[in-house]
Image (cartoon, rainbow, N blue to C red):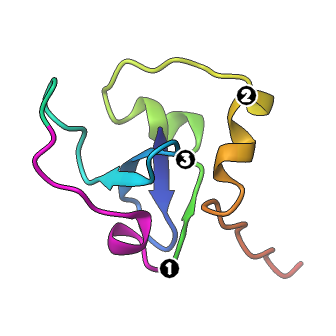
Amino acid sequence: MLLKVVGSERIVFFCPLCGVAWRAPPAERRLEQVETLQDLAPGGVTLPTSSEALGTGFALAEVAFEDWFSLLEDAVKPLPLSPS
């Protein structure tokens, strides 16, 4: 799953089932480094926009909100509202 680091343009990769995060997706069938979202994004993460996600160049699959949000409720940090 792609997530955006709060306060940055950086995209990180996250597996909500095991809690492992990566700066770049691991090579096929190899896991050489294990980090957490706290390691990679101490200020939290949010969801990238569609254009940010597409800008990664990776093949993406759309998954219904209801199918994944409960896995991320604690990880995704809401963005502060801008003053009007």
Mark 1 → mark 2, Cα distance in angstroms: 25 Å
Nearer the observer, 12 or 9: 12
Does 16 appear above or below 76? above
As drawn, the label of residue 43 is 1
Classify mark 1: helix, strand or loop.
loop
The amino acid type of the residue labelled 2 equals: Asp
Q: From the top left corner, tell me how far across and down residue 50 is, in percent.
A: 57, 34
Does 27 appear above or below 44? above
**N-term-proximal mark, 1 vs 2:** 1
As drawn, the label of residue 67 is 2
Looking at the rendering, the stretch of residues picked out in magenta corresponds to 31-42
- Label 3 belongs to which residue? 48
Q: From the top left corner, tell me how far across and down residue 80 is, in percent.
A: 75, 76
Query: Are the two marked residues, 2 and 3, in contact with CB atoms closer than 8 angstroms?
Result: no
The amino acid type of the residue labelled 1 equals: Gly
Mark 3 → mark 1, Cα distance in angstroms: 15 Å
Foreground tag (1 vs 2): 2
